[in-house]
Amino acid sequence: MRRILEYQKARSIDEALALWREAPSARYLAGGTDLLPRARAGGASPGRLVDIKGIPELAAIEELPSGDIAIGAAVSVAAVAAHPAVRRRFPALALCASALGSYPLRHRATVAGNICNASPCADTAAALLCLDAYVRCASPSGTRRISIHEWFLGPGQTSLAPGELAVAVELPAAAAGGRAELGRISRRQGVDIATVAVLLVAVPGADRRHRVAMLSVAPTPRRVPEAEDLLDRMGASAAAQAAQAAMSAAQPIDDVRGSAAYRREMVGVLLQRAARALGAD
Amino acid sequence: MGIPIRVMVNGQLESLQVEPDESLLAMLRERLDLTGAKEGCNEGECGACVVLLDGKAVNACLVLAAEADGREVTTIEGLGRAGALHPLQRAFLAHQAVQCGFCTPGMVMTAAALLRENPDPSEAEIRTALSGNLCRCTGYRQILDAVLTAAKEMRAAGERSPR
């Protein structure tokens, strides 16, 4: 059975929104690396796909006068990972972007698509959570910014309204300049999603000097303030306690990639390794 | 309902009517008889279908044919030809980096894209680039050696991999 009945390429944000309003089961298509396999596999047929890659303002990485960086929703993960300002100022995102999928997949996948897909293992989500990112969204009623901390509602669920389009991911200047360490366990190094992953970001001088996020151990990617508090107060000497706090905060499940017990244990191991590597202080 | 597209494939302009759910891979194989790119998993996990889209390695199974409108595609058939093989193709033969051959076009195209971006990759960089290309026959040692050899040869010749 044919599941994709119609392909439309939008030339502007307004045109994309209008194309969705005509066919409200439609999906916006960015990289398609999650959407196309799912559209073929089953579930509700999207019918219409609205390709957003031809919208000029979605195709760029922009350095704003405020020092923020805005990543257009159609920018590939590979372009983000290679972007000099992202690498220099937001290494956590460059690191997570480089860990996503495979070399060819990274040329198609997008950061916006990664978080709209809202998998608990979304690699770039770990960085966006640690960087306190915002998602700029467009709908017929106007534009709004959604904090990444209010974005993920559950597996595959976000706070985007029906028909609302994520147009850019914004990295606030306040989180720039840190160092990052990613611990990521998967069955093989390329392509496979994380069985469990922990990202530790150290941002010297920020109100919150240590930021921790974990993947694949909760219904959504999750920040771990419980562990951050300990690291901020006591530095590297608190690594073992922070690991315990992260293990307590994790709500992992058993699945084909690993057991809940293994995942919980690895959260602690990965956080301690990351703290050691960064010399958390 | 066909979608009219114009796409440059291996240097030749093709005007086609494609279906909305048709993948670039299906278009290449079934409309253009370019069967070098293979369908392995059809979900971006195996790399057997890798081609170059505007010079970048992509999984052709995850690109809609309609998305290729106005773009340039290079397949293994466009990389070299009989009697004038690409250095990567020669090196794969010299190192016997082929057993059943199903993964080979994807391996070669991924490596070709890598060498365009990075003419002098370390072995670790080659491993990272090829980690999305599965081979179930040979093991990867000969493949890594072939890419290293081709990179060296191409640097010596000062030639660039064609799109």
Image (cartoon, rainbow, N blue to C red):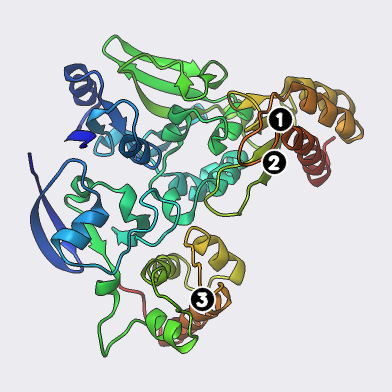
Question: In screen coordinates, is B109 left or right of A196?
Answer: left
* Along the viewing direction, whichever of B19 and A243 lies nearer the viewer: B19
* Along the viewing direction, whichever of A3 and A13 lies nearer the viewer: A3
Mark 2 vs mark 3, CA separation in Å? 35 Å
Residue under numbered circle 1: A212
The image shows residue A273 at horizontal and vertical percentages of 80, 44
Same-subunit check for callouts 2 and 3? no
Mark 1 vs mark 3, CA separation in Å? 38 Å
Residue under numbered circle 2: A179
Q: Earlier in the sequence, mark 1 or mark 2?
A: 2
Quadrant in the rendering for residue A127: top right
Callout 3 amino acid: Ile
Callout 2 amino acid: Arg
* Along the viewing direction, whichever of A108 and B131 lies nearer the viewer: B131
The N terminus of chain B appears in which quarter of the rendering?
A: top left
Q: Residue at x 54, y 79 (%)?
A: B142
Q: Is residue A57 above or below residue B48?
A: above
Callout 1 amino acid: Val
Q: Residue at x 49, y 67 (%)?
A: B135
The C terminus of chain B appears in which quarter of the rendering?
A: bottom left
